[in-house]
């Protein structure tokens, strides 16, 4: 592996821009991760809305939109930029897969040109990058545009298989 790789160390020590899954298990987030510079404004509708599984976020709202929300259900964060060709390919596929997952996961999109600090704290050096958060921690992720089948596998891995019913119905059925 070359020492002049500009993507080296971005996820683990394999380096390089690659489309693969990355495990974060057991690692602590870097100091300040998800700590907003100003407290996010309270949402006008505090209750979940059925179609509220995809949203854009900001640095100030990251703690509420991702860290806190991931304590209730897995949240995928799509780090993208308007000039990124592979991002333009991946984002619509992610949105479609998240909608098809029926609420098992949420998708939060972050434009790194407008909000670079969170991506920097996570060590993201190449986009598109998708990081899954559970219980307030990054737990898994991938970089690069990947096929729809792999996106669906990733969502199943992070959010569970489900039975087609909303998560509340699944929880009641399991009780």
Image: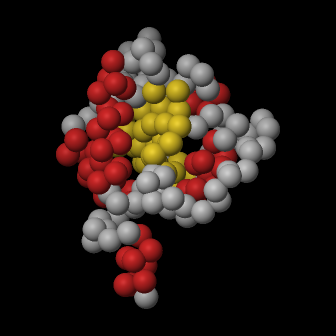
Q: Is residue 75 above or below residue 164?
A: above
Q: x and y percent of residue 100 in the render?
A: 29, 54
Nearest the camera: 118 or 54? 54
Q: Is residue 4 above or below residue 126?
A: above
Q: Quadrant of residue 39?
A: top right
Residue in the image at 35% along x and 42% along y? 95
Chosen colour scheme: secondary structure
Q: Quadrant of the N terminus?
A: top left
Residue in the image at 44% along x and 74% along y? 168
Furthest residue to the front?
44
Q: x and y percent of residue 148 in the render?
A: 22, 41
Judged left or right of residue 129, residue 152 is: left
- Count of marks placed on residues: 0
Q: x and y percent of residue 93 in the render?
A: 29, 38
Q: x and y percent of residue 112 in the render?
A: 54, 25
Q: Is residue 1 above or below residue 156?
A: above
Residue in the image at 79% along x and 38% along y? 38
Nearest the camera: 108 or 74? 108
Residue in the image at 42% along x and 33% along y? 129
Q: Can the viewer see residue 25?
A: no
Furthest residue to the bottom?
175
Judged left or right of residue 159, residue 36 is: right
Judged left or right of residue 168, residue 85 is: left
Q: Can the viewer see residue 72?
A: yes
Furthest residue to the right?
38
Q: Quadrant of the C terminus?
A: bottom left
Nearest the camera: 20 or 117? 117
């Amino acid at each position: 592996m070359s020492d002049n790789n500009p993507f080296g160390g971005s996820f683990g020590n394999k380096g390089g821009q690659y489309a693969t899954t990355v495990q974060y298990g057991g690692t602590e987030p870097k100091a300040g991760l998800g700590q907003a510079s100003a407290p996010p404004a309270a949402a006008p509708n505090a209750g979940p809305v059925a179609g509220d599984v995809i949203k854009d976020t900001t640095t100030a709202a990251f703690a509420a939109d991702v860290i806190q929300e991931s304590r209730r259900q897995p949240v995928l964060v799509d780090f993208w930029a308007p000039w990124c060709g592979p991002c333009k390919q991946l984002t619509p596929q992610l949105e479609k897969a998240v909608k098809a997952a029926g609420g098992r996961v949420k998708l939060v999109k972050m434009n790194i040109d407008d909000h670079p600090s969170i991506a920097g704290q996570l060590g993201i050096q190449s986009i598109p990058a998708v990081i899954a958060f559970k219980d307030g921690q990054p737990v898994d992720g991938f970089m690069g545009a990947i096929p729809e089948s792999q996106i669906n596998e990733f969502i199943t891995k992070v959010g569970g298989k489900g039975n087609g019913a909303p998560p509340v119905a699944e929880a009641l059925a399991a009780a």
